[in-house]
Image (cartoon, rainbow, N blue to C red):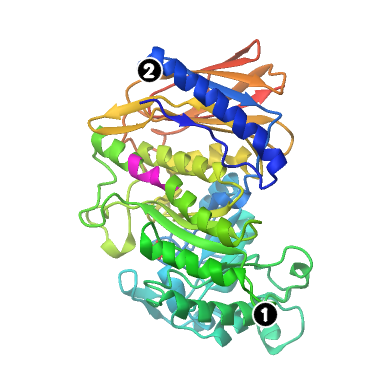
Amino acid sequence: MALIHTSDLGLTSNPAQSAAPVLRSLAIGLVLASLTVTMPVMAAESVKLSIDASKTGAKIDRNIFGQFAEHLGRGVYEGIWVGPDSNIPNIRGIRNDVVAALKALRVPNVRWPGGCFADEYHWRKGIGPANQRVETLNPNWGGVIEPNTFGTHEFMDFLDQIGADAYVSVNVGSGTPQEAAEWLEYMTTAQPTMLAKERAANGHPAPYKVPFLGIGNESWDCGGNMAPDYYLSQLKIYSRFVRNFNPAQQAKQQMLKIAVGPGGDGPRWIDWTEAVMKAYQHHTWSWDINGLSMHNYTVVRWQDKFASVGFGETEYAQFLKSTLEMDGLVNRHSAIMDKYDPAKKVALVVDEWGSWYAPLPGSNPGFLVQQNSLRDAVLAALNLNIFARHADRVRMANIAQMINVLQAMIMTDKEKMVLTPTYYVFKMYVPFQDATFVPVAFDAGTYTHGNISLPRVDAIAAKDTTGKLWLAIINLDPNQPAEIEASLSGITAKAAAGEILTAPKVDSVNSFDAPKTVVPKPVSARVQGGKLALKLDPKSVTVVSVEQ
Ligand code: AHR
């Protein structure tokens, strides 16, 4: 069956702006759908896209390209932090190769210190002279020693080196409002308080910026098994007292407070979103939130998880089918949010997403080490496209996790570093950061494997801050190339250029020995008479820009 993507979900809350493209998308979709009635979609048939660059939707917030670095396995220790005495080249203990790679991604924000770890983290143990830091335990993740050598100052230094903003999750589960309030005062006040003086004595007289504050993590589970009402009482207290004092964050760049939200689909999560958003609707001057977190991993099954390497087309198709459920999930929770917050003041923040596979054989199961294949690249692009279509509500997201953990950008082994297929998708999508969504009408067609049917292609478009048009197109079909014919109106298209990411097999990976198996290559694109023609390899992600 042919699927129609009307691609209208990124349209703004301004009805005048949004109505026309929706109708247009629908109209084109219907025309294309009727074509498929008389002309069944053949595997190699060309896919027609229609883009009117004068019709725009919401801004695709750069923060949807956010990262997550938890004290988990080798994510922080070895992944970021090697210590100043390491033979691995570093600046103040932070490895240079990783910093250079992340700078190229223009990482907008990093969520830290967890995850489940955040609700057992006590910030005071991570400040002060390195040789006086105490060792504690990390019971969530392998029960290993937490050396506390990477704490607040090291995190902020790392952010400074890569040019990202801080998204700090405070401890609601086993901490107190006072502990969290003092941490924020320590980080952000410019007044000469005892805590500000302590910060200065520890090497940073100037206040830090904390643009994003997470109030707890999965408080319905590892964050304390709280019922919605109990969490809401905590949320109101933390929202009231955990203040940001940075003078630069008062009138402008105010800190956004992000509440714990749902962890999936079904009545339990619907109830949670209902409870938080209903409370928000009636919030008073003394507390507020600006974001509702949502966590959703692509797992297929939690018991006997899928392998991250050594799989075939069946597992490829099953995993992509599962990841596409993100769209329905966003729709359902957004609908609840719309009910209580029609002005869309509260962002849906998908601050944990990505693939979760079985741990690699021989690794500590508590370290969540998995490989990263071409399948993950396609999965990442599909999710980024979903977020872009929901750009009016999804204004922030954080893939889990940045280095050596789950769906990582980067893997390290002592002094070695390799960039994953997912890394390259994030790199190719950089032009979409803060770009304005442009609706794309197309007939996705169908890729079928056994009893699984998926859209054959997926596409988004956006105009960057200079007005240049960008397209991201995914060919999900692992067997057939896709000929793309995009009709472009609203611009005078002269040429197009871009890159395609693919590999010989669905489970191809970049390894330390063969780091260039899955890397982007130039794609040939032709523009003639207002039409863009492209040939997409099977199982590929392509990003092109259109010259005017
Ligand atoms: O990302 C790994 C873990 O998954 C996080 O710590 C937790 O929030 C989630 O359950």
Outermost bottom residue: 194
Q: Secondary structure at mark 2?
A: loop
CA neighbours of label 2 inside 10 A, class few (<14), some (14 to 19), many (20+): some
Percent coordinates x, y for residue 175 in the rendering: 48, 83
Q: Nearer the viewer, residue 392 or 186?
A: 392
Residue 492 visible in the displayed image: yes
Classify 548 as above or below 189.
above
Instruction: Please tell me whether residue 279 is drawn above or below residue 480 in the rendered image.
Output: below
Q: Quadrant of residue 304?
A: bottom left
Amino acid type, label 2: Val
Q: Is residue 470 magenta?
A: no
Disc on res. 401: none
Which percent across, then down, holds residue 246? Answer: 73, 73
* Residue at 26% over, 62% down: 365
Whether residue 265 sits left or right of residue 388 in the image: it is left
Chain-order first, disc 2 or disc 1? 2
| Residue 323 part of the magenta-drawn span | yes
Residue 131 vs residue 98, the one in the foreground: 98
Residue 513 is left or right of residue 167, and the answer is: left
C-alpha span from label 2 to label 1: 57 Å
Q: Quadrant of the C terminus?
A: top right
Looking at the image, residue 512 lies above or below residue 29: below
| Badge number at residue 41 | 2
**Residue found at x 55% / y 59%:** 337
Tell me if residue 91 can be seen: no
**What's the mark number on residue 286?**
1
Amino acid bearing label 1: Ser
Q: Quadrant of ligand 1?
A: bottom left
